[in-house]
Amino acid sequence: MTKTSMRAIDALEEAQRIAFAPFVFQAVVSLRKLGVFDFIFKHRRKGGVSIEDISNELGITDYGIGVLLEIAESSKIVCQNEAGNYELTTIGYYLNFNETVNVNVNFTNEVCYKGLFHLDEAITTGKPSGLKELGDWPTIYEGLSKLEPQQQKAWFDFDHHYSDDIFSDALTILFEKERKSIFDIGANTGKFTINCCKYNDQVKITMVDLPQQLNIAKKNVAQEGFEDRVTTHGIDWLSENPQLPKGADTYWLCQFLDCFSIAEIEKILRTCTESMNENSELIIIETYTDRQRFDNTKFILEATSLYFTALANGNSKMYKAEEVLGAAKVAGLSLKEDRALGEYHTMFTFSKS
Ligand SMILES: C[S@@+](CC[C@H](N)C(=O)[O-])C[C@H]1O[C@@H](n2cnc3c(N)ncnc32)[C@H](O)[C@@H]1O
């Protein structure tokens, strides 16, 4: 963005909105939790609702509803019609009903809100200083299986939301070729592995992840009845000398490399390259900040980077495509295919150079 001129009064208003942004955010969370947005929406065709209507229906004081709606109105989330009754604006509608916004609000509130208070410390130390608000682990990944149910749900909903939608297109592309063995690196809950087994009844998959995460993934795979085609390989990529077994035909890294710094990505990809044979393919699927069509998705990715800084590991982010391509080159991979996938993702296919 280039510097544009702005009237002082407008700049001051923007600055004040930022100064009180957490207040607006928590007001939105409260309006959602207390059912106020739902109630207003339900009465949209009946001329809106008054504070008294909301108060009587939801059993909240006029005072409570009043303070929340005042700031919501100033923030263009609700408006009053000619009769003085409240209606949702389009922003209010999205805050309550848009799936991506919902996932982001829950993730921000349940996982990130308290930890972000320690962002400056995380920046200066290079450590996820906010993680102590969730638990005592070196990175969030060791703690995923131990988060409180609400936090865990918000984390997995956020993670799955940005990958579930591409699985179907990705599987079609993936099985344009015969695939006998896939390493699902960063298998998480085993969702992709399960989808793969459903899509193709021959393929064998090795789920690669931290041992504690694999326990969850293994349970999910067994529930679907695929344990005969799925094995696991426990690994900590941050350990001294991580090892992969040799020779899968496909190495699948979906929304995984953003959990690591560029130096760590080079190490992971080099380990993969050493395990690959000359016919193997390595596929990286990521959401890159410089490959987004809309400003709002670029903004989501930039915010997600701060989650990595303050809470996840202190040293990773959502990257530009060029940064990951550079690391792949250093690791001895050559790019064979570069294609867009769904609304946000890019799929790179590499072979060993
Ligand atoms: C964002 S999730 C991957 C999501 C999944 N591949 C998908 O497409 O939805 C990142 C995964 O990397 C794993 N991970 C993070 N740090 C790791 C480490 N040091 N060693 C091994 N796995 C790690 C996490 O346990 C998690 O399952």
Image (cartoon, grey):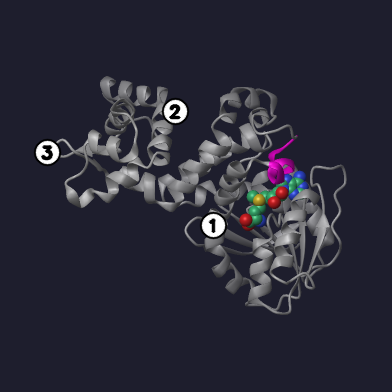
- The answer to whether the residues at label 3 and label 1 have Cβ atoms under 8 Å apart is no
- In the displayed structure, would residue 46 be above or below residue 183? above
Q: Is residue 267 left or right of residue 148?
A: right
Task: Name the foreground residue: 274 vs 159.
Answer: 159
Would you place residue 204 above or below residue 103 in this image?
Answer: below
Circle 3 SS class: loop
Amino acid type at circle 2 is: Pro
Image coordinates of residue 147 in percent, x first then y, are: 66, 41
Residue 109 colored in magenta in the image: no
Q: CA distance from mark 2 to mark 1?
A: 30 Å
The picture places residue 38, in percent across and down from the top left corner, at 34, 46
Q: Nearer the viewer, residue 128 or 96?
A: 96
- Mark 1 — residue? 345
Dot placed on the residue nearer the N-terminal end, 3 or 2: 2
Q: Secondary structure at mark 2?
A: helix
Look at mark 2 in the image and give the residue it sits on: 22
Which dot, 3 or 1, sits closer to the camera?
3
Look at the numbered disc 2 and say if its residue's Cβ is closer than 8 Å to ligand 1.
no
Q: Which residue shows up at 72% across the image and 58% down it? A: 217
